[in-house]
Image (tube, grey):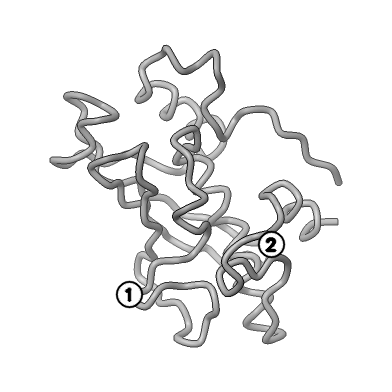
Amino acid sequence: MSFTVDGRLVILPAERGLPRWKVERNKLKATFPQFRFYAGNVFSTLLGSKNIEKVKGKLRTKSGTIYPIQVIMPESYPYEMPTIKTLGWNIHSDCPHKYDDQPLCVLLPERWSSNMTVAFLVAKTALWLHKYEIWQETGRWPGSDEHKRGGGGLSLWDELLDLFT
């Protein structure tokens, strides 16, 4: 199986002049149609009058397990990375790739770029969930251990390729 980077998960140079909300919505709908934006009182940097506070949806892993998740949008999005949280389930307390208050560690905050999108984070979360299930079975986190080492990990595409080939 091979993967190609086709711009579905990041803001491309040609899209920078377009309304960010529309680009984000289209990318999320194209890659993860089961996810929805939910309005609140934040997110004005991105949407102006469309105050999106979070994105919710469910991801299914290869094992068939369905994981509800939510992406909590910071007020300064896209200049600050959103937080990924679980909905109705808890991460094992010994999991090596989580923060103390339970959010999933799918990407180190200092590696976040304003060109990344919610769809990018949902893709990283899908990868994280597959690794989480492997860790539960084997006690070993597959691929990059960037959370512990603080950098130098593989790209999303390299990790997907390693996991599914």
**Residue 127, horizontal then vertical, whole percent:** 62, 58
The residue under label 1 is 101
Residue 119 vertical position relative to residue 93 in the rendered view, above or below: above
Along the viewing direction, whichever of 129 and 12 lies nearer the viewer: 12
* Discs 2, 1 touching: Cβ within 8 Å: no
Secondary element type, mark 2: loop
- Left or right, 49 with respect to 107, comes to left
Residue 71 vertical position relative to residue 117 in the rendered view, above or below: below
- The CA span between labels 2 and 1 is 27 Å
- Outermost residue toward the left in this view: 41
Along the viewing direction, whichever of 10 and 31 lies nearer the viewer: 10
| Image point (20%, 31%), residue name | 44
Q: Name the quadrant containing residue 31.
A: top right
**Residue 23, horizontal then vertical, whole percent:** 44, 23
Could you classify mark 1 by the number of other residues whose Cα lies within 10 Å: few (under 14), some (14-19), or many (20 or more)?
Answer: few
Residue 90 vertical position relative to residue 69 in the rendered view, above or below: below
**Which one is closest to the eye, mark 2 or mark 1?**
1
- Left or right, 163 with respect to 71, comes to right
Q: Which mark is residue 62?
A: 2
Could you classify mark 2 by the number of other residues whose Cα lies within 10 Å: few (under 14), some (14-19), or many (20 or more)?
Answer: few
| Image point (18%, 40%), residue name | 42
